[in-house]
Amino acid sequence: MDKYKGDLRFFMKLRTSVRKRYAEVVDFKEYEARIQKLVDQHVGTGEVEKITDLVNIFDADAFAKEVEKLGSTASKADTIAYRTKRTIHDRMQEDPAFYRRFSEMLEEAIRAFREQRLSDAEYLRKVTEIAEKIKNRTGDDIPEPLAHRDVAKAFFGVLQDVFAKYTDDGFEPRTASTTASLAIDEIIQQNRIVNWTNNTDVQNRMMGAIEDYLFDLKEQHRIDLTFEDIDRILEMVLDIARTRYA
């Protein structure tokens, strides 16, 4: 019995440590009552650290205190990296282009550290920098007209990705993306009503108006915007709008 109690204490502590460091969340509800009964009977309340919700990186003070409690530089860096990775995953639909770019940067930093191309200190510096850019929305080159239009910023990223391949005949993807993101944002705001995310008619009106705008843009700039491009824009901007304007 002493062996099993010791194993239980060890693995409960290991679970807590791993969960904090790598931001892993597993649903243990199915087993929680039985585990708690076992702990109460054989271990005692003083033996197990209670697992609380992971602190969000946007809660700057609380997260800084949590990281400061950790021992090694590598464990601090991993905690920041994997908590930031979790934040990116949770918020990806809010601004796919923005979060995808930082996701790639973060994955490269983690990979470089695992391959020993980065020291512990360099790894900590890189992931801290990435986390700060995400928290403060810096590091992305957003045009001035979008500075205070957060949802239009997300549309801009989508449009930039699609328009980037059309650079011939004087077409400027950045300028067109800026204008189009503001126009699409206006279309959505003009049409949205209470509970619009569950209203197919409203969403169809939005898509129809955005599609008309994109065809006008295609004619105006004489670019070969394909049906696949238009469908991609429609799908992604509606997904963003459902998330941000719900």
Image (cartoon, helix red, strand yellow):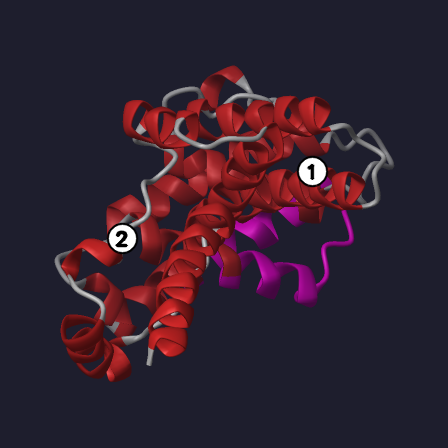
**Which structural element holds mark 2?**
loop
Residue 60, percent from left and from top: 33, 25
Residue closest to the eye, 103 or 150 = 103
Residue 102, percent from left and from top: 61, 38
Where residue 68 sits, quadrant-wise, is top left
Residue 212 magenta-highlighted: yes
Where residue 67 sits, quadrant-wise, is top left
Residue closest to the eye, 194 or 67 = 67
Instruction: Look at the image and tell me in which quarter the C terminus lies.
Output: bottom left
**Which structural element holds mark 1?**
helix
Q: Residue at x 47, y 44 (%)?
A: 83
Q: Name which residue type carries label 2.
A: Glu
Q: Which residue is mark 2?
A: 49
Asked whether, in this view, residue 47 is left or right of residue 124, the answer is left
Mark pair 1, 2: CA separation: 34 Å
Residue 109 magenta-highlighted: no
Task: Count the numbered circles shown.
Answer: 2
